[in-house]
Amino acid sequence: MKQQALIASIAMVLSSAALANEGFQPTAKACVNVGKEISRVSGEMDAAKSGIQKSWLKRQLGALETKRSSCSTNGFKGRQLVAKTDN
């Protein structure tokens, strides 16, 4: 049972990594959540126990970094937290 779950999770990560950068066109809408997705994948990589899973998450992270770079090059920025100050 554990082996089936591992295989299923590897397949899911593999397909996500393969699709992460395929046909990506930087637009304001497409770039808005790239940073949030990078944070999510980084957290999953820290929690991953399997070397195979970590490897695929690392590939997905690389694809997301490429997306972020593409967004930045084209003048789009992801969501940024802005601290409010009372003056």
Image (tube, rainbow, N blue to C red):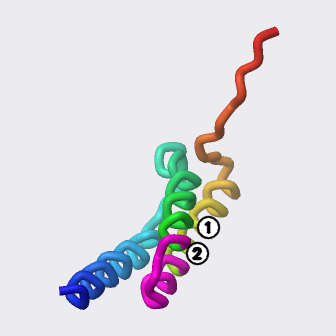
Mark 2 Cα shell of 10 Å, populated few (<14), some (14-19), many (≥20): some
User: Residue at the location (62% across, 60% down)?
Assistant: 68
Asked whether 17 or 30 is in front, the reply is 17
Quadrant position of the N terminus in the picture: bottom left
The image position of residue 77, as x and y in percent, is: 64, 46
User: Residue at the location (55% across, 79% down)?
Assistant: 58
User: Residue at the location (48% across, 44% down)?
Assistant: 29
- Residue 62: numbered disc: 2
Asked whether 10 or 75 is in front, the reply is 10
The image position of residue 4, as x and y in percent, is: 20, 87
In the image, the segment drawn in magenta is: 46-58
In the image, what residue type sits under mark 1? Glu
- Residue 77: numbered disc: none
Q: In the image, is residue 85 above or below residue 51?
A: above
Q: Is residue 81 magenta?
A: no
Locate residue 39: give its quadrant. Answer: bottom right
Q: Secondary structure at mark 2?
A: helix
The image position of residue 52, as x and y in percent, is: 44, 90
Quadrant position of the C terminus in the picture: top right
Q: In the image, is residue 37 above or below residue 85?
A: below
User: Residue at the location (46% across, 81% down)?
Assistant: 49
Q: What kind of secondary structure does the magenta stretch mostly adopt?
A: helix
In the image, what residue type sits under mark 2? Gly
Q: Secondary structure at mark 1?
A: helix
Instruction: List the residue tagged with mark 1.
Output: 65
Query: In the shown orientation, is residue 29 left or right of residue 72?
Result: left
